[in-house]
Amino acid sequence: MSAHAKDPMLPRPFRVEKVKRELSDTFTMELVPAEGGGFSFAAGQFNMLYVFGIGEVPISISGDPGEHERLVHTTRAVGKVSGALDALKVGDVIGVRGPYGIPWPVEAAFGRDLVFVAGGVGLAPLRPAIYQAMANRERFGKVMVLYGARTPEDILFKKEIERWRGRFDMDVAVTVDRATGKWGGNVGVVTNLVAKGGFDPQNTTAFVCGPEVMMRYAAQALEKKGVGRGSIFVSMERNMKCGVGLCGHCQWGTHFVCKDGPVFRYDSIADLFSIREL
Amino acid sequence: MGQPHDLGNIIDAHPFFDGIDAELRTLLVGCAANERFEPGEFLLREGKAADKFFLIRGGTVAVEVDVPGKKPIILETMGEGEVLGWSWMVAPFMATFDARATVAVRALSFDGKCLRKKMAADPALGYAVMSRFVPVMAHRLQQTRMQLLDLYGVDAEGGKKKKKGKGD
C-alpha cells in the first residue's frame, strides 16, 4: 500500500498537462500523476487540490471515470486558491488528495429514465455521470440533460453539449436566464425544462447539481412532475478542510458534506434546505 | 380560421383548458381562431392593443423588449402547450412586451374583447378562465424572481468557500 493510500491527509503530486479556458472565469485542468500510476474515481467524487504555499480547495472531478490515466477538474476562479489554480501553467505540480465523497448512484439507476438537471458550473460535477451513462446507454430508458446557464456566453462545455445533442439516444435541452435576439434557443429558468417533462416520473432517477437555490427549485419541479424524493439526488457544497469527516468544517445538520455527501438523496436532506441557520 | 368543431378539438387537445366543461368550451370556440405566424412575425407588440391571447400549438415564441439600436432582450421563450398573453384581461389592455415567432408558430388565438364580454355575462366561464390563468401568472412571477436572483452569477454563488469548482 502506498503512503498516499495509508494517509488520507498526504497529497500526491500531479503535474498539469493541459489547461483549457472554458469561460471567462472558468477553466479545465488535466492532471497526470507526477510519480506515475493511475487514478480511479467514481462520478460525483471530489479531490482536495493543493497549490503549494497557497492552500487547498475541494474541487469535483469533471472527467470520465472510465479514464484512469489523467485527472480532469473544471473550476471557477473566484478565490485565492482557485485563482492560484487558474494561474498554473503546463508542467506545474500540485498536490492532490482524494477521491473523496459519495458518488452519483449511476448503476442504481439502471433500467430507469435518467435525468440530469444542471445549473451553471454545476454541469462539471455531473459530467462524469453523463459519461458513465453514455458508456452504459443501453442500460437506461431515456437519458436527458437539462441545463441552465446565465447567458449564451456562459454555457459550459458548449461544444460537448452540441455533440450530446447530436446523438439520437439522448435528449439535451439548454436554457439561459437572459439573452439577446442573437440567441435562438430557450430563455427561462431551468425548472421550465423540468416542467416540460418527457420522462416517466414514476421510473426516473434525477441527478441535480448547481447553486443550492437552483437545486431546491429543481427538486421541487421534479417532485411536481411526480418524481419521488427518494429518486432525486443533489450534490451539496459546504466549506471543507480535511475532506474526510474529521475537522467538522463541512457539517450540515447531522451530516458531514465531505463524507456523507457531496451527493445526497433528496429525501434525506430536503428538510435541511429550509433551515436558514445551516 | 378553422371550423368550430375543429377549434373545439384543438381546445380539448391543449393542456391549458384541460377539463373544461363542454358548454363553456362552446363559448370559448366562439372567440377562437386558428393562426399561423412565420419566423420573425409578431404575435404581440409592446404598447399596442392586447386584443388576443394565444395557446401555442407548435413552434417557439420569444417574449422580448426592444432596445433601440441593439438586438432585443429576450425575457422568455415559450413553446408548444404554453399560453401567451394576459394583458387582454388587464385594463388598459395594452401589450407590455413584444412576442415574436422565432420559428413558424401555430397557435389558437382568442379575441380578448369577445371573451371579456362572455366572462362578464357568465361567471362560470369567467372562473374557468381565471382559474387557469392565475397559476400561469404565478409561475411567470416565480420564474421572473428566479431570473432576478441571477443564480449562476459569482455573487449569488459566493459567500462561502465552495467545492465543485465554484469556490475558493
Image: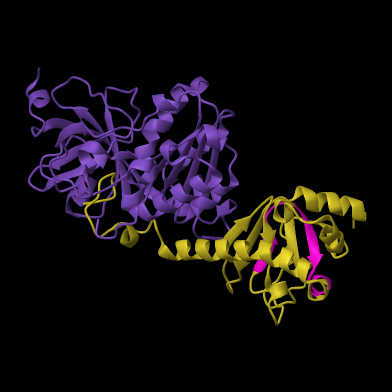
Chain colours: A purple, B yellow
In which quadrant is the C terminus of chain A drawn? bottom left
- In this rendering, position of residue A46 left or right of residue B134: left
Q: Decide which of A19, B80 is in the foreground and name it.
A: B80
On the image, the x and y values in percent for residue A179 come to 52, 59
> What span is colored magenta in the figure?
B98-116
> Residue drawn at (32%, 35%), measured in percent from left and top?
A44
Query: Within the magenta stretch, is there residue B18?
Result: no
Q: In which quarter of the view is residue B70 placed?
A: bottom right
Task: Tell me if residue B97 comes above or below residue A183 in the rendering.
Answer: below
On the image, the x and y values in percent for residue A183 come to 56, 55
Q: Decide which of A157, B77 is in the foreground and name it.
A: B77
Looking at the image, the residue that sits furthest to the bottom is B92
On the image, the x and y values in percent for residue B114 come to 84, 72
Residue A251 visible, this angle: yes
In which quadrant is the N terminus of chain A drawn? top left
- In this rendering, position of residue A226 left or right of residue A74: right
- In this rendering, position of residue A202 left or right of residue A88: right
